[in-house]
């Protein structure tokens, strides 16, 4: 018998068996999610290529590819097939059927997965597909107009598109009809369960204290240093060295350049990150690499040992604030620490930086001076940039702030809170991409990330002391001795693996023993300013 | 009225109009093909990333993404929807409906497009989807086993997978049930209308003459030159310089590195190519870039002015042999010419090559010595590598050659035709990827490409002389004066834009005025050997 004929017989036998022994519903659901995840990761691959390699003329075709995938994904994520799979899996779950085949996962894991999937499906179903289409087009238009307006530093060119996006997003919140305000509804995908009330509790102390700390910092003796820069090749070498020190596995990661640094996961074992060179700012590329590697480590931790759950909600990030806390930990708590500078300054000196000791690198890593730009801001001033954006987007969505007043309000707040006045709209309210794509509710995640990072760092410090690490600052000890893998192990155990099992605040409470608060972050900043005063 | 509400009204109006004014069938067919092309180009983007950037551990997930797309594409390309669109469009075409809206295209263009689509659909429909699945799996398995076998230089590890692939491809040919032999049927997608009889006519003179020419070439006084190499950076600079000289538009092209050089089109204005550095072979990267750029120029010419036809058969390559003729033209006829070396040797010298005149670079570009490897072979010996492969795959598919005899037969033919014996299976019958992926019928395209390139070059030479370019060799004159754009314009006009309007032989006849023959290629080789003799 020919090989082909034999395999045909075996296939037929399998087909018959499949008909009489249907797979368990949760397995069929898993297959469905697996295919959705394949499509999502194809989308991510196109996005990666678009930002790292695609020639400019490829943009419009790429836009069509992405829009085709978006439509197919929306259809999958709101389908009746998904709905019935969820119903079946829920029944199965309540009867604890197929338990033995769940492997290392519990029935409560599965049950939580189903609950979240149901929630996501209900949201998708409530939205009129026509609105989905309108939003996709308006986002693309908004992004294009924003780019032009920013290049011309002219907000009025972008204002009509922004009005349109606000109107569509308000309509979306109305269709979702949740028991929440408009801003709260739109913020849910980024920060599950966030409320305006809670945001106020967390941010009010920062609103009071950050400007005082900034005044204190500006009174520091100015650090005497000549302007210096590093060659592109040296900066790349330093980044590669950093990633090697931090345990990067070259078989599952790749690093590239892009206009805006980002980190993205393209498969359960395929992690990508990008960085960029900013002329005249020799630390920008290095710190961006540290930041994006933190994001990537988090996603690597999420996927760890759960290839089978890739595509399930429990394999997805807890929230954007938690995600940001992980990038900020590696960027700020580790790379901007004194111990890190003590260890790394010789590499910088060898690369051509005019440095004679760790202190000088450390001062350069921690300028603590206000500027008009969020992305290049340091730990102290970053929060002020976010408070301004948070207030303004709530005002635009819920308090009737007219779009045309945005530049005036933006500049007024920058003067009041940071003491700087943007020289034009490009440096001012046009600097960020988020609103141009209709993303409202995202900005607070950055600042919440700072709070979470500080509170988790304290818990980590305590835990490391308990296992016998010497000194006041166990994290600092690990950095001094090049043992960042100890920090990573702790994060891998306590923070990374939970996914969407709980929301970010619950996770912080579970790990640190207390509710999320702004105190650890403020104490951390006070301590840093004091150190900078002592060491100058 | 809110903006959202207004746009909703407009959408409803459009919907009603669409219902009462349905689009013409050929336009609906165009939309269908457009979406197919979007999916195909997504597949290509994944392939590009896989070969240029993906970390090794990403392979298995990437395999799943590609297999999902392959299944969706097969479904689209064999669907009843496509079938009825084709029927409607054909009726419309015969009644010359919607003519005014065809723009710059003719009814005969559309009619040819429909004919080819119908042909492709019929082929897809005849194949059992189970066989499609089996083939996809067996190709992946074959590729994996081939990699392992090649690394171990042990053919016996790969032999069972090859037997399986041969059996499946024979079955495929049986299902296609064309009025052709098995090998001919499988070769159609690469070389439309090719027959074994025609192949024999074209290749028999080469079979006689190439070994004689090789003996003549080996009698040449050996070229005295020390072994030299160039740094990676210098090689890349030379490649960039070459592409700039040859009119590369950086806004629509990108160059990267990959283990095997290739060229690929990701969108109507998005052209990518790769090259590679081979240690100890300082011209390999440069010539690979020239070769791949030739492929890319062809695809750029195909897409030129036909963004609307991207996705239609007339926007697709005429055949693989024609494709190869375009890469070989730029690699061999241009980059390996004496005039090119005269012009480029100073750049090579500046990059560190021990060269004092053009002649030395030209000799290095044209070794004309036999070796065991196809990819690194020169113009003279390349054909012999192809003759061996062509004979063997026909023997495997149609003449009952047992798979286990392949290494013996391979080595015997290499000894007889090229006078070299591969030192093991890795250097021998395991060197090429094609059979491991079940690709039979592709190899002859390479050699046909040499024949086509030579015959088209003669036609080009004549045409350029007619427009008043001086000298015996007008192509050489253009190269000497750095005016390769004249060569490109001619190709853009005569060769590139036809797509699948006709087959490769018809195109050659249209352009050159005579049937394809091996004579121009053999004369070209004879001439080159004579020049090498004279100049030594």
Image (tube, coloured by chain):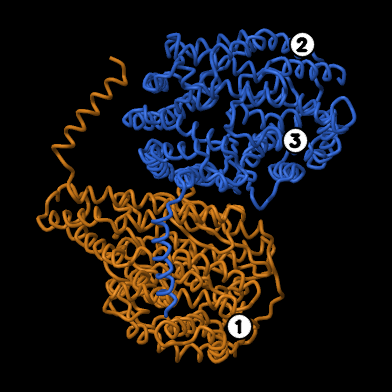
Chain colours: A orange, B blue
With B493 as the anchor, is A108 left or right in this view?
A: left
With B42 as the anchor, is B243 left or right in this view?
A: right
**Percent from the top left, x then y, of residue B480?**
85, 35
Q: Name the residue that disc number 1 marks.
A: A536
Q: Name the residue that disc number 3 marks.
A: B490
Between marks 2 and 1, how big is the CA–CA gap? 81 Å
The answer to whether marks 3 and 1 mark residues whose Cβ atoms lie closer than 8 Å is no
> 10 Å neighbourhood of mark 1: few (<14), some, or many (≥20)?
few
Q: Is residue A371 above or below residue B468?
A: below
Between marks 3 and 2, how big is the CA–CA gap? 34 Å
> 10 Å neighbourhood of mark 3: few (<14), some, or many (≥20)?
some
> 10 Å neighbourhood of mark 2: few (<14), some, or many (≥20)?
some
**Percent from the top left, x then y, of residue B28?**
45, 47
Image disc number at residue B431: none
Do the residues indicated by labels 2 and 1 lie within the same chain of the protein? Answer: no
Q: Name the residue that disc number 2 marks.
A: B216
Tag 1 secondary structure: loop
State the image quarter where residue B36 is shown.
top left
Q: Is residue B165 above or below residue A534?
A: above
């Amino acid at each position: 018998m020919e090989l082909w004929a034999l395999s045909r017989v075996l296939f037929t036998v399998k087909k018959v068996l499949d008909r009489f022994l249907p797979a368990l519903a949760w397995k069929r659901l898993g297959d469905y999610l697996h295919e959705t995840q394949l499509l999502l990761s194809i989308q991510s691959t196109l996005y990666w290529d678009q930002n790292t390699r695609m020639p400019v003329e490829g943009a419009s075709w790429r836009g069509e590819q992405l829009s085709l995938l978006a439509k197919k994904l929306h259809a999958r994520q709101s389908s009746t097939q998904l709905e019935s799979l969820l119903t079946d899996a829920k029944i199965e779950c309540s009867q604890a059927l197929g338990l033995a085949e769940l492997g290392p996962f519990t029935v409560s894991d599965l049950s939580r997965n189903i609950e979240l999937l149901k929630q996501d499906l209900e949201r998708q179903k409530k939205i009129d597909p026509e609105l989905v289409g309108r939003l996709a087009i308006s986002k693309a238009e908004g992004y294009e107009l924003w780019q032009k307006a920013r290049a011309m530093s002219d907000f009025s060119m972008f204002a009509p598109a922004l009005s349109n996006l606000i109107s569509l997003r308000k309509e979306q919140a109305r269709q979702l009809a949740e028991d929440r305000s408009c801003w709260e509804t739109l913020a849910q995908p980024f920060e599950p369960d966030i409320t305006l009330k809670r945001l106020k509790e967390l941010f009010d102390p920062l609103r009071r204290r950050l400007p005082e700390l900034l005044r204190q910092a500006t009174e520091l003796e100015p650090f005497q240093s000549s302007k210096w820069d590093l060659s592109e090749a040296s900066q790349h070498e330093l980044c590669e060295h950093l990633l090697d020190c931090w345990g990067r596995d070259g078989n599952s990661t790749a690093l590239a350049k892009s206009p805006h640094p980002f980190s993205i996961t393209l498969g359960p074992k395929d992690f990508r990150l990008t960085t960029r060179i900013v002329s005249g700012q020799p630390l920008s590329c290095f710190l961006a690499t540290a930041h994006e590697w933190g994001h990537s480590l988090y996603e690597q931790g999420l996927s760890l040992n759960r290839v089978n759950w890739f595509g399930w909600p429990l394999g997805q990030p807890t929230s954007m604030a938690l995600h940001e806390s992980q990038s900020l930990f590696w960027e700020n708590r580790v790379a901007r620490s004194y111990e890190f500078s003590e260890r790394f300054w010789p590499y910088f000196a060898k690369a051509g930086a005019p440095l004679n000791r760790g202190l000088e690198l450390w001062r350069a890593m921690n300028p603590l001076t206000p500027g008009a730009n969020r992305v290049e801001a340091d730990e102290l001033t970053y929060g002020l940039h976010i408070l301004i954006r948070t207030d303004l987007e709530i005002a635009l969505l819920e308090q009737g702030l007219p779009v045309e007043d945005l530049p005036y309000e933006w500049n007024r707040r920058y003067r009041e809170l940071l003491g700087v006045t943007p020289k034009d709209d490009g440096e001012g309210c046009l600097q960020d991409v988020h609103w141009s794509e209709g993303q409202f509710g995202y900005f607070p995640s950055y600042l919440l990330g700072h709070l979470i990072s500080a509170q988790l760092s304290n818990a980590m410090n305590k835990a490391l002391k308990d296992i016998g690490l010497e000194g006041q600052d166990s994290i600092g000890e690990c950095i001094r001795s090049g043992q960042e893998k100890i920090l990573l192990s702790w994060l891998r155990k306590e923070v990374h693996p939970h996914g969407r099992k709980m929301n970010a605040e619950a996770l912080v409470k579970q790990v640190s023993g207390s509710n999320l608060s702004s105190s650890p972050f403020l104490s951390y900043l006070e301590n840093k300013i004091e150190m900078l005063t002592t060491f100058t």
